[in-house]
Image (cartoon, helix red, strand yellow):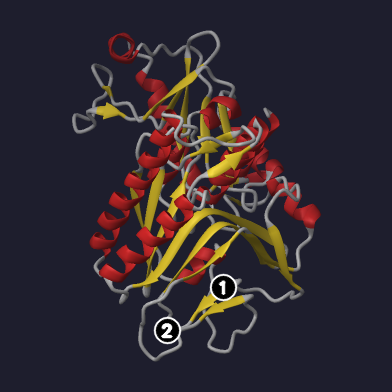
Amino acid sequence: MQFNEFIKLNEQIWHEYFSRIFTGFLKKQLTLQDGGKILFPNIILFTQTDDHYIVELLGANRGYSGLTTKKHKEKSTQKYLYQFDYQEESGYEGSMFRFESSDNKVIRGMSGMDGFLLSKSIDKNKLNQRFGFRDHWPTQLVRANEENGPLITFSENFPGCYFNNCVLVNRLNDLYRVKDIVHMTIINKKYSKEFYKEDLNKNLNEAFFQGSLIGVKYCKEEKIEHFVLSSQFVNTFLIPNIRETTIGEFLSKNPSFIQKALSCKQFLYEKELEWVEGNPNLEEKFINPDILIEREDGYFNICDLKLPKLDRKNLTKGKHKRRRFVDDVQEGIAQLANYEEYFHFDKNKEFAKSKYNVEVQSPELILIVGNYENLRAEEVREAARSVKSNYRIIDYDTLNALFLNKI
């Protein structure tokens, strides 16, 4: 099966499936016996690795209005799941599960896991410090093993597998990353398109008629909805080599996250603002801020998204007296300065007001970059001594913590 065939097939089947469920609830053909809410995904992420195709559902909304397709590429399926850089070793035996093939070729048959948390030995205090671990995750399977490495591995001719409502707690030395999976399917590139279509339809239909729904999250109370959304956000920004646009799309499709985390009335995502005056570079026709955030007073702050840089140990460099940001952060600061300058000119202000009803006055300039592992508060303070006071630099874990603190 070709990657584009895999994408089109999943887009069609999952859209029809979620539409049927959502319509069923709207028409009261489907009900929840003990109340609560169903949360639907709104992003379908397709990843191509050297050996496999992966489809994963992301997002958490009460309604269903379609799935936005995002594409991703990663060399190793193990790295996609493990979230840390990993060089596969032929003799590695530290995984909890290894998906095998019973033959020396790819044959039909997909296995799966439902409702498990998988981990090696973990320090729950450290896990809670970063992710708010509250023992609310599924049945826990823990392997008493201190060895670094992925929890799941695959044989060469493994055909395919799926994960429903599973959590992977990955560890590299004293660092933790969590992958909270609503639904994910991994298949061998050699797997038959016809077999995959039949298998997927069969799994979804069987679950539906048995009263069990795949790819959605049931939440009995509103607080759990917020935990689910938080977990989905963490899952998104911890995907290795994820694109900024995928993170931005997640925030755009799940607006309550930014609204709570940054205490704003509303926000606008990726709006083009034309340079009417003030820019000597004729090739730069407009600015395109990632997020414009409306404050309580009606004016807007400006936010730029950069990557969490999972592969970098530190986003500052130099010692105390010369502490400064690395180029990735400096680029974001420079971009925000350009956005702020745009609003120094009256004709630009008029354009923003007339087209988007956006007014900017004494804006806070927010740069979201890095993560818990590489953006240390004291070093950020030192590096930011040369930056104007209206700049605010926060990492993705801090953004998630701000959201959780508003629950």
**Residue 32 visible to the viewer:** yes
Residue density around tag 2, few if under 14, some if 14–19, many if 20 or more, within 10 Å: some
Q: Amino acid type of disc 1?
A: Ile
The answer to whether residue 40 is above or below residue 82 is above
Q: Position of residue 399 (x, y in %)?
A: 60, 37
Q: Residue at x 62, y 47 (%)?
A: 375
Q: Residue at x 49, y 35 (%)?
A: 61
Q: Position of residue 380 (x, y in %)?
A: 64, 41
The answer to whether residue 339 is above or below residue 357 is below
**Residue situated in front as seen by the camera: 156 or 165:** 165
Q: Toward which corner of the image does residue 101 lie, by quadrant?
A: bottom left
Residue 152 numbered mark, or none: 1
Q: Position of residue 363 (x, y in %)?
A: 50, 18
The answer to whether residue 314 is left or right of residue 206 is right
Dot 1 falls on a residue whose secondary structure is strand
The reply to whether discs 1 and 2 touch (Cβ–Cβ < 8 Å) is: no
The quarter of the picture where the N terminus appears is bottom left
Which residue carries the number 2 mark?
156
**Residue situated in front as seen by the camera: 345 or 403:** 403
